[in-house]
Structures are given as C-alpha cells and as structure tokens.
Amino acid sequence: MFYFCLRNESKKDMKKVLLTGISGYIGLHCAVELLKQGYVVKGSIRSLKKAKKVEDTIKKYIDPKGNLEFCELNLLEDQGWDEAVADCDFVMHVASPFVSKVPKDENELIKPAVEGTLRALRAAHKASIKRVVLTSSMVAMLGDLKGDNNITKNSWTDVDAKNITAYLKSKTIAEKSAWDFVQHTDMELVTIHPGPVYGPTLSGDLSGESMSLFKRVLTGELPRMLNASINMSDVRDVAKIHVEALENKKAANQRFVVASEKSHAFLEISEELKDNGYKVGTGIVPNFLVKLLALFNDEMKGMLPYVGKTYAADISETKRTFNWQPMPFKTMVLDTAKSVDGVLKG
C-alpha cells in the first residue's frame, strides 16, 4: 500500500483522523473543518491518482501546513485498512454510496455500505482507536415510512416497510451493523444523521444528488418539486458536528440528527429562490404521477418513501450536546444556489 503524504513531521503531537471518503461532498467539508480545528487528516480515496486534485481543492479554503496525507482504500476490499488506521487517533467514516435512483440489484448499495463500515470498525478496534464517528442519515430513522411521526434518537427505519428502497436499507443496515459491532468492544461510536444535505460545493462537482437538484432547479430542468417535507441539513453544520463529535465526552455512543429545527417542504427551496430573484418554477409534482411513473422509472421509484409524507425530527439533544444552532434555512438555500450558479457560469 502506497501513501501520498504531506505530513509535517514537526507536529507529531497533533491528533490524526482517518477520514474515509475525503473526495466526496461531505468529506471535503469535513477535511477543511478538521484542518481548521488543528487535526492532521489522513484522507482515504479509491485511487491515489485523485490525491493531487483533492489536495488542490482543499488548499483553496485552507493551507494544510503539512497536515494532510492520503491513503488508498476500497469499501469492498480488506487491503490497506489496518495500515491506514495504525497511526491514527480517531476514525471518521464518511464514505458510503448515495443515489436516490433504485439500482437493479439492491446489494450494489447495501454491500459497500455495510462491508465498508465493518472494515473501518474492525481496523479501528485492532488499532485501539477510542472513538469512531460514522456518517449515517435520517433515512435510517424513518420508522414505517408512513411519515407524520416525530423522529428521535431511538427511531429506526423498518427495512421491511412498503416502498423501502436500497438506499434506505443500506444506511439502516450499515448503522445497525456498526452498533452491533461496538457492543462487544470498549470502543465508542457516534453516528451523525443529516437530512437532505445542501450548502456550497467545495469541488465544483455538480453531479452528486445534492448539487444536482439545485442545478436542475436553477436551469429550469426541474420546474416542479416532490410533495414531501423533511428536516434539511447544511453541509457546513454536518461537517462541524462530525468534528466536534470526535472528542465531546457527552457524545459517546449517541445518535445525533444534524438538520434544520423544523421540517421543510422541497417546494420551499424553489419559493425561497424565486423570492430572491431566481427565475425558477414553483410547481408540485402530483402524488399520483410520481406513483405512476415509479412503475417503470427507477428514479421515481426511489422517491416513493417520501412522496406525500412529512418527516420531522427532534434536534434538541444535538443542540444541547454541542451548544449548536443550525444554519438558517434561507442561508442554506441561497448559499447553495450561489455556489451552483457560480459553477454553471464558470
């Protein structure tokens, strides 16, 4: 296993975090926040050929000062995990596949999510890591998928519920596997549960689910929104709580929803944009049409757990534990739009 290393050897006393999925939307924000907070970051990527690009992106927002290094890991392969964790103090496992479209084989999502999580935990345990912070999701907390229920830290998605999707299963099963694993160890686990995540892109990549939605709205490709409501998350909040969860004593072995105070309808995104001068559509896709299209469209099928539903989560414990206030919804929407619009205009 080869490592691309930018470590400042004069700072060996700094705590090091293995950050999986550093090249992703959330991962990049976590890397920048970790560096700001004085941690050494070892970021995992599937190919070290990507290291220079990730480094250059991070350098636009903070000077790593020699405290950034990379390793090559695959969620579906054992190679490299023990070596990657061996010199670290914490593990932040962010890497996991995320697509709303229903795959032909659900194991395309479930297998890497579950196996990747367990590989990270096994390696952490072997290296006597005290705490692992895991990126889960509110989709692992949706109960029976009927909506209109108040999600708490004790809520779990029923993987046998009607209209369950591979993505919901992947996040739920992966997190349950993580809790089952740490039960038999003295290692601490913290799981972070965002809703749909928006906020500025650091890389300029608009291909992911979060940035793609805003791109489609701003370009007129998506003039109508799904009739659904859920607590939404700003990526900057998500990264901040990930980092604070590493050493907050009260966070040990807890699940935290990191999202807006209240549930927001997706239509509110379009309405906020229109109110602030963007020429966007503010229509709603009829529920019956989504259900009809879902019969032969995998993307629409992926929307069935949400259509016509309102999911609301209790974030009081997150606010109390981290002395945190979520980013205002308007700020999140407008900052995301500004970021995406900037990429579109070059």
Image (cartoon, rainbow, N blue to C red):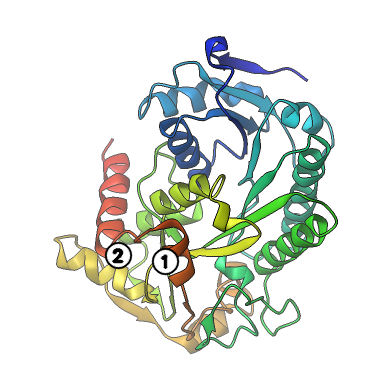
- Identify residue type, mark 1: Met
- Identify residue type, mark 2: Phe
Q: Say left or right for 311 vs 173.
A: left
Furthest residue in direction top, as rendered: 10
Against 214, residue 312 (above or below) is below
Q: Is residue 196 visible?
A: no
Front in this rendered view, residue 197 or 238: 238
Secondary structure under the numbered disc 2 in the rendered image:
helix
Residue that carries the numbered disc 1 in the rendered image: 232
Image quarter of residue 284: bottom left
Secondary structure under the numbered disc 1 in the rendered image:
loop
Q: Quadrant of the N terminus?
A: top right
| Number of the label disc, if any, that sits on residue 290 | none
Q: Residue at x 30, y 45 (%)?
A: 339
Name the spot of residue 153 as percent of width and height, x first: 59, 72
How many discs appear?
A: 2
Front in this rendered view, residue 177 or 54: 177
Q: Are marks 2 and 1 in contact (CB under 8 Å)?
A: yes
Q: Residue at x 27, y 41 (%)?
A: 342
Q: Say left or right for 16 vs 116.
A: left
Furthest residue in direction front, as rendered: 249
Against 221, residue 283 (above or below) is below
Name the spot of residue 112 as percent of width and height, x first: 75, 50
| Number of the label disc, if any, that sits on residue 329 | 2
Q: Label 1: few (<14), some or many (≥20) within 10 Å? A: many
Q: Say left or right for 46 vs 12.
A: right
Q: Earlier in the sequence, mark 2 or mark 1?
A: 1
Against 221, residue 162 (above or below) is below
Image quarter of residue 297: bottom right
